[in-house]
Amino acid sequence: MNDQPTSSNRGAGKSGTSGKPGKPHRRPKKDPARILAFEVLRAVDERDAYANLVLPPLLKKARAKEGFDGRDAALATELVYGTLRLQGTYDAIVAACIDRPLREVDPPVLDVLNLGVHQLLGTRIPTHAAVSASVELARVVLGDGRAKFVNAVLRKVSQHDLDAWLERVAPPYDEDPEDHLAVVHSHPRWVVSALWDSLGGGRAGIEDLLEADNERPEVTLVARPGRTTAEAVLAEVGEDSGLPGRWSPYAVRLTEGGEPGAFDVVRTGRAGVQDEGSQLVALALANAPVEGSDSTWLDGCAGPGGKAAMLAGLAAERGAVLLASEKQTHRAGLVGKALAGNPGPYQVIAADGTRPPWRSGTFDRVLMDVPCTGLGALRRRPEARWRRRPEDLDGFGPLQRSLLRTALDSVRVGGVVGYATCSPHLAETRAVVDDVLKSVGGAELIDARPLMEGVPALGDGPDVQLWPHLHGTDAMYLALIRRTA
Ligand SMILES: C[S@@+](CC[C@H](N)C(=O)[O-])C[C@H]1O[C@@H](n2cnc3c(N)ncnc32)[C@H](O)[C@@H]1O
């Protein structure tokens, strides 16, 4: 069970083993929702695409065609996200139903199988409908020979419900807790291990976290400071479809899902889509006590501009100016769009934060929201957990340290730096902060918890780790550091 298949070892199964690879039928596409879901899974596997970027335009195109309605869109969406989230569990179940290693099954066949397993074990679709629709899908996209294989495997899968399958395919918790949790909650084992190291505690907490990672997150809006208010956003969204944020006074939660871009307040940029964890991070940095002047702020990793837009609005309210800097030019362009309409002055530049064009000691407040593995945002990017590798940490580590050093160099004595990640992995959070503080000197951690007033379970401090299962946010990390010399 240690070698849970992943998107890329799906790619290794080129030999095709699932029956005779008959020619795909050229019959009319009868089941557009399942075909569309299959196309998205192929794009995710073959092109490393992100489902949340590929699916919406395909849905839009399909809606424009006659016959693809809201129910089709809801089914396609559920099939894509459900299958990607639970891929690890479903792979283990399929592996138990075939007589060869999973990696020898062609990736498109595995996608059709997992779509079928999700319908059988993760939805209320009746068994016969789930099997026959999956076999029909296989005929259309894979051909008759492979459709027979799909039929045989799904009939085996349909003999048990999910709980019974988990009993069969997951090792007992007492024998191997991490492997058990990896199979039951569909996370790579190394991710379970890393999340548990950071979260601490016993079985209940990590199970709650892994479950929360598999839930569809609410869409949260931010009322951009100085441009609108949460009350005004809520009034536009309607009290039936929205709720105030749990923690951030600028947040509005869309309880009915839906398309945020449909709201005028979002279209005009007065509000944006932003997780409450990100809002809390920007607010904590903005409200951290600094000694002396408070007029010049920096966001050193600003793209695509969510936190920068919030900081720029807060800066404007205090007569301060934000410099938003981002290495990638096209992402700097997105920052420009997010900040357009800000009530006060700001500047956006494309610059490498490891070789900054500004002078040392320039800023009163600095945010470094560094590039990271994104293991704190698995709810939104269901495929990310299968794509990430432990080796990725080796690439991020030096960059994260270098960017934090820049931040500490850029802030004046008495000013404050916020080091943030959307990963709770200790190698990207505390290890980076501890290493850099040891090597730099003249800087001290300040307690970030009082700056998130009212938010419970923030840990022992002085840094803060948010969690999906405890706070309903992404697992954002924040350390606040004051420059003392
Ligand atoms: C986690 S994202 C920041 C998210 C952003 N703060 C927000 O709230 O929208 C990290 C950003 O850092 C940028 N980046 C990566 N390397 C960089 C570097 N050397 N200097 C500046 N920015 C960099 C990435 O392109 C990415 O846009």
Image (spheres, grey):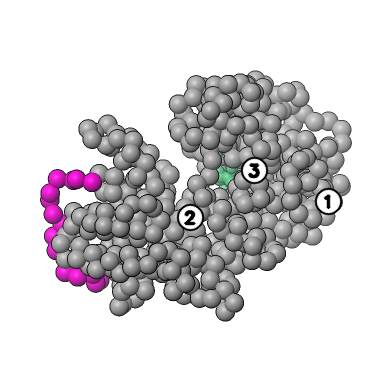
> Which x, y percent locates residue 274?
58, 37
Give the residue at x 37% y 52%.
124
User: Looking at mark 2, is its residue's CB closer than 8 Å to ligand 1?
Assistant: no
Give the residue at x 79% y 53%.
461
Q: CA distance from mark 3 to mark 2?
A: 19 Å
Give the residue at x 64% y 35%.
245
Labelled disc at residue 277: 3
Give the residue at x 49% y 24%.
263
Magenta segment includes 27: yes
Name the element at disc 2: helix
Q: Nearer the viewer, mark 2 or mark 1?
A: 2
- Is residue 129 or residue 460 the one in the foreground? 129
- The local crowd at label 3, few if under 14, some if 14 to 19, many if 20 or more residues have their Cα within 10 Å, is many
- Is residue 475 or residue 406 the one in the foreground? 475
Labelled disc at residue 444: 1
Q: Amino acid at mark 2?
A: Ala
Disc 3 or 2, which lies upstream in sequence? 3
Name the element at disc 1: strand
Label 2 belongs to which residue? 384
Which corner quadrant of the figure contains ligand 1?
A: top right
User: Looking at mark 1, is its residue's CB closer than 8 Å to ligand 1?
Assistant: no
Magenta range:
15-31
Q: Is residue 453 above or below residue 316?
A: below
User: Do the residues bearing badges 3 and 2 touch, measured as CB atoms within 8 Å?
Assistant: no
Magenta segment includes 19: yes
Q: Nearer the viewer, mark 3 or mark 2?
A: 3
> Which x, y percent locates residue 294?
80, 31
